[in-house]
Structures are given as C-alpha cells and as structure tokens.
Image (cartoon, coloured by chain):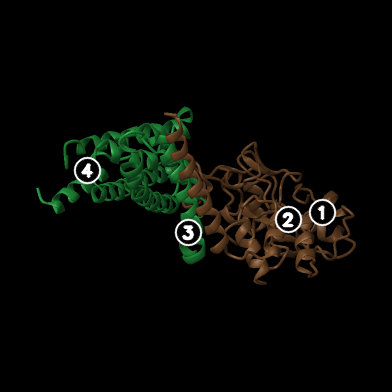
Chain colours: A brown, B green
Amino acid sequence: MEILIPVIIVAVIGLIAGVGLSLASKFMAVPIDEKQEKIRAALPGANCGACGYSGCDGYAAALVAGEAAPDKCAPGGADAAAAIAEILGVEVKSEAKIAFIACKGGCENTITKYAYSGIQSCGAANGLSGGPLACEYGCIGFGDCFKACQFGAIKMENGRPVICPDTCTGCGKCTLVCPKSLISLVPKDYKTAVACSNKKKGATVVKNCKVSCIACGMCAKACESGAIKLENNLAVIDRSLCTGCGKCREACKRGVII
Amino acid sequence: MNSNTAIASVLLAAILTNNMVLSKFLGICPFLGVSKKTGTAFSMSVAVTLVMVVSTAVTWPIYHFILAPDYTYLETIVFILVIAAIVQLIEIVLKRYIKPVYNALGIYLPLITTNCAVLGITMLNITNGLGFVQSLFNALGAGLGFMLAMLLFSGVRERLEMADIPEFLKGLPITLIAASLVSLSFLGFAGIGG
C-alpha cells in the first residue's frame, strides 16, 4: 500500500498536465490554413532561406497570403514549384537554375601579384587591393563560395571552386558571398557560357591569366546565329539566340567558352 | 538583513557567483550549441529565463505542499513532468496571444524542455531551502546569468570565427578551450554575494 500514494501523486499531476495541455491546445489553437500545411509538406524543408523568407514555414505562410511567387524555392526546383502551384491553383513558369562561375583562373592559371598571408577568406583578401592575384576581376580562390554552399555542391580543385551540376540546387547562396560577383544563376541546361569576367584590354589580360577572354572576337565570327557580341572587352552570349552548336567553343583559342 | 538586500544578494549570487553555465556547468548543450551568433544566443537566453521563472513558480508549491515531507524522492520525476508540460503550455499561450515573441523564440522554446539548467535551478531552489519569493528571484538571476554567459561566449565565438586557428583545434576543440577560459574568469566572482 505504501507505494500507492506516490504512484497516485505522479499520475494525478501527469493527468492534470495532460488535460490542461489538451484543453489549452483546443481553446487557444491558432487556425492554420490547410493550404499552408500542404505547401509546407511540399517544400524540401532545408530552411536555406534562398526564397528570401525566414525558412520553409515563413515561405509557406507568405505563399498562402499571396505575397510570394511559387517558384522561389531553389532546392525544391520545378517539382516543388509545380506542387505549390497545384495547391494554390495558379500557374507557374519556372526553370531549374544552376550556379555558374564566370572565371577559370585561380592560383594555377593567374599570376600572383603579392604574397598574402592574412585571413583565408576571399572577402578579407579582396579588401587588400583586390586580392593577391593579378587579375582584379577574377576568382581569389579562398573558397568563400565553398563555405557558403549548404549542399556540398562546390568543390575546391587546384585553388579554384568547381560547381558540381548534380548537387547544385541553384539556391544562390554562393552568388551573394563572392566579393567579385563572379557567380550567377543560369538555366540548368545552359549550352554555352563565357567563363571570364575581365573587362581590361586583351594585352593586359594575356599577361595576367592563361585562361582569359581577350575579346579577340573569334567566337563572334564563328557564331552562325549571331548570338555573341563583344561588350567591355568580353564576349557576351545572348542565350535566346544560342543554338548550342558549339562552334564558338572550338573557335576560342583561350578555352574560355564552356 | 532586511528582505530587499536578501533578494539582491540572491540575485547577484545567481547571476555571478553561482552562474548556471560557468560555475555549475549546467545547460552546457545550448551554451555550446546556440552560441554561434549573438542574436540566437539572446533569443535562447530569454526563453530559458522565462521558463526558469515560470517553472520555479509552479514546482516550488508542488514540492512544499504535495511532496514534502514524505515523498521528496519524487522530486526529479515530478519536476521533469511539470517542466515539460509548462514549456508546451507557454508555447501554446505565446502562439495565441503574443505571436511576435513566439516567432522570435522560434525553435528555442521547445528545445528548453530538455534543458538541464531549468531542472537544475528548480531543484537547487529546494535543496538550498529558499522561500517562494527568493526562489523566484534565484530563478530570474540564474536566467540572467545564463544570458550573460551566452552573450559573452557568443562574442568570443564570433571572434574565433575570424581568428587563424591551427587545423587540429578548429571547431569544437577551440570552442571547449574558450568555454573553459570564460568559466575560469568567473572564478573571480567566487565569494561575492554569498
């Protein structure tokens, strides 16, 4: 009998707590939109913040409130956008995106301007006269983008970042941290791209970097659909005109078009 | 000693001398886990302080009017039960009535359910034989002490992020070393406030 009283005490306290909680959750429940729950389930749940909201919950709430477009979720991509659009009953046009680094340089291909021994981050190095490499437009190679990537889609190879197309979700986190603004989001099935951002004249560029666009114009001549133009000493490809024939890639002596 | 100075001394002792994290080594999990940024450290500390005070207000009467004197050995299990329920209740109430606070605390509120610092302070109040009002102030002090430790340490960690740390110390090792040094500095408060 001795054991009965303590058991009853714990049981009663537990019961009071349980009943109290269930009553509280019933009477003080906040009505959650059914749509919001469904949308939340359709989102990948990475809480990466690429949509511009505090997390998947915040984005779902904004979607229900009609404040957000359904194609903002980068990790979820087209699948999530389609699912959200179906729940909300709207149509969506979206294409999968991928990060692209407009530089092929890095410490192997570019001449070093000075020896840098400070904090190993692109942001810090960039503050010191644009970083230790001679090309002031190019990749510094300390891997700020590599550190920013939540999905492990950026690898550092020979001192420069390489994007792994299979794991890149196109969330765009890396585009924000690059002090040189080299990374941009491009359509996942992009056919051609110019991997150089140097706007200096050809003679200077040639000296500084082995893989740089010198604006020779060979690609523009080779292009049959007239998609390539030269702007600011750089080849620029108009994706709406590009047929993906690959003639520019063959024509480029510097290996900059990929 | 009149009651005001007694309460002031309880408060001071709880914040500095008997600092939950740095002197009693309770609540190390959030101390190491959520102290990376000052903002989140602050949210977590506010949530912990709130839960500590409310749990003390509930567990003290339970102990003294229901458990004492025969069933004091039920202390731990009953306190855990009550604290878990209180945290859930606070979450529901905040969500209903003070939505901004609920949003600001976010994930940190439910995390506190299993925070040993909360259970620790409620049990220490009983062990030290404090009265009801003193217990409340002790809990408030412990919460503020937790906040002080979190904010100090998040500052240290934000500096560590920028420091050039040897490869073998990067991450958790340097964090633990830093924690021990911060804790060591709190040894200087020993003896103040009783």
Q: Label 3: which residue?
A: B104
Q: Between residues B157 and A228, which one lies in front from this camera angle?
A: B157
Position of A59 relative to A251 (above/below): below
Q: Residue at x 73, y 55 (%)?
A: A42
Q: Amino acid at mark 2?
A: Ala
Secondary structure at badge 3 equals helix
The chain carrying label 4 is B
Q: Secondary structure at mark 1?
A: loop
Q: Residue A82 in the image: x percent, y percent?
A: 79, 61
- In this figure, which residue is indicated by the disc labeled 1? A189
Residue holding disc 4: B13
Q: Which mark is residue A42?
A: 2
Which amino acid is tagged 1? Asp
In the rendered image, residues at marks 2 and 4 fall on the same chain: no
Write down the quadrant of residue A198 in the picture: bottom right
1 and 3 marks in contact (CB < 8 Å): no
Q: Secondary structure at mark 2?
A: helix
Local crowd size for mark 3, using a 10 Å CA cut-off: few (<14), some (14–19), many (≥20): some
